[in-house]
Image (cartoon, rainbow, N blue to C red):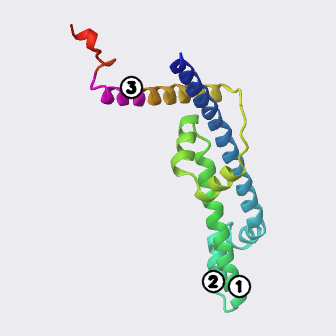
């Protein structure tokens, strides 16, 4: 009986952990979008200048600033270049999050921007979403956690009892 309750507890724990995944991915996506909007806004004035003088080519504007004799312009070239690199990185990150759910989930798991993932994890508040995706994640996580823990328990029992299901009693040897 205790074993049945432990199975239920493991299943419930896996379910609660699994339903967190879509919420976490959603929070990560929102954070990437916010950073991207901020980066675009930071570059807007420079983009306008590049549009006016360099046919919209921000790299040409950066090179123009770098080749200037004025140390202020050279310093600004590094700042603009940094903003441009960050904006392009965030744009790639945003595009990776626009794919199907399994590609998006995999990307957040293995290829996410480390800084944004860390920010997301630090600010994350547990939530229970009742979306089909959350329910699916919950059920799969619950099943896997229960199955893995029970399998480990069975292997340990098998090792302890030498492959027998129950210990052999003296009365059973007659």
Query: Mark 3 or 2, which is nearer the eye?
Result: 3
On the image, the x and y values in percent for residue 43 come to: 73, 66
User: Can you identify the residue that label 1 sits on?
Assistant: 73
Counting from the top left corner in percent of width and height, residue 7 is at 53, 22
Which type of secondary structure does the marked residue at label 3 adopt? Answer: helix
**28 over 119 or under it: above or below:** above
Whether 25 is among the magenta residues is no
User: Which one is nearer the viewer's eye here, 19 or 166?
Assistant: 166
Compared with 24, 52 (above or below) is below
Q: Quadrant of the C terminus?
A: top left
Question: What number is the disc on residue 154?
Answer: 3
From what the image shows, is residue 43 above or below residue 27? below
Give the camera-side residue of 32 and 44: 32
Q: Which residues are magenta?
A: 152-163
Name the element at disc 2: helix
Query: Looking at this rendering, what residue extends furthest in the top direction?
Result: 174
Q: Secondary structure at mark 1?
A: helix
Q: Quickly name the residue at label 2.
A: 66
Would you say the residues marked 2 and 1 are in contact, meaning their CB atoms lie under 8 Å apart? yes
Marked residue nearer the N-terminal end (3 or 2): 2
Cβ atoms at labels 1 and 3 below 8 Å apart = no
Q: Earlier in the sequence, mark 1 or mark 3?
A: 1
Mark 2 or mark 1: whose residue is earlier in sequence = 2
Mark 3 to mark 2 CA distance (whole Å): 67 Å
Is 170 on the left or on the right of 81, as rendered? left
Q: How many marks?
A: 3
């Amino acid at each position: 009986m205790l074993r049945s309750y432990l199975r239920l507890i493991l299943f419930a724990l896996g379910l609660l952990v699994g339903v967190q995944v879509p919420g976490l991915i959603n929070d990560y996506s929102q954070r990437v979008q916010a950073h991207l909007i901020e980066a675009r806004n930071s570059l807007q004035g420079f983009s306008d200048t590049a549009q006016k003088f360099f046919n919209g080519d921000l790299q040409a504007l950066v090179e123009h600033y770098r080749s200037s004799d004025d140390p202020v312009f050279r310093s600004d070239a590094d700042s603009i270049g940094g903003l441009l690199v960050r904006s392009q990185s965030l744009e790639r990150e945003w595009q990776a999050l626009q794919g199907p759910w399994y590609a998006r989930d995999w990307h957040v798991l293995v290829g996410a921007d480390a800084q944004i993932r860390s920010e997301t994890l630090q600010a994350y508040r547990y939530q229970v979403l009742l979306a089909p995706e959350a329910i699916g994640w919950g059920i799969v996580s619950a099943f896997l956690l229960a199955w893995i823990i029970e399998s480990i328990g069975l292997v340990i029992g098998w090792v302890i009892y030498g492959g027998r299901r129950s210990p052999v009693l003296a009365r059973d040897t007659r």
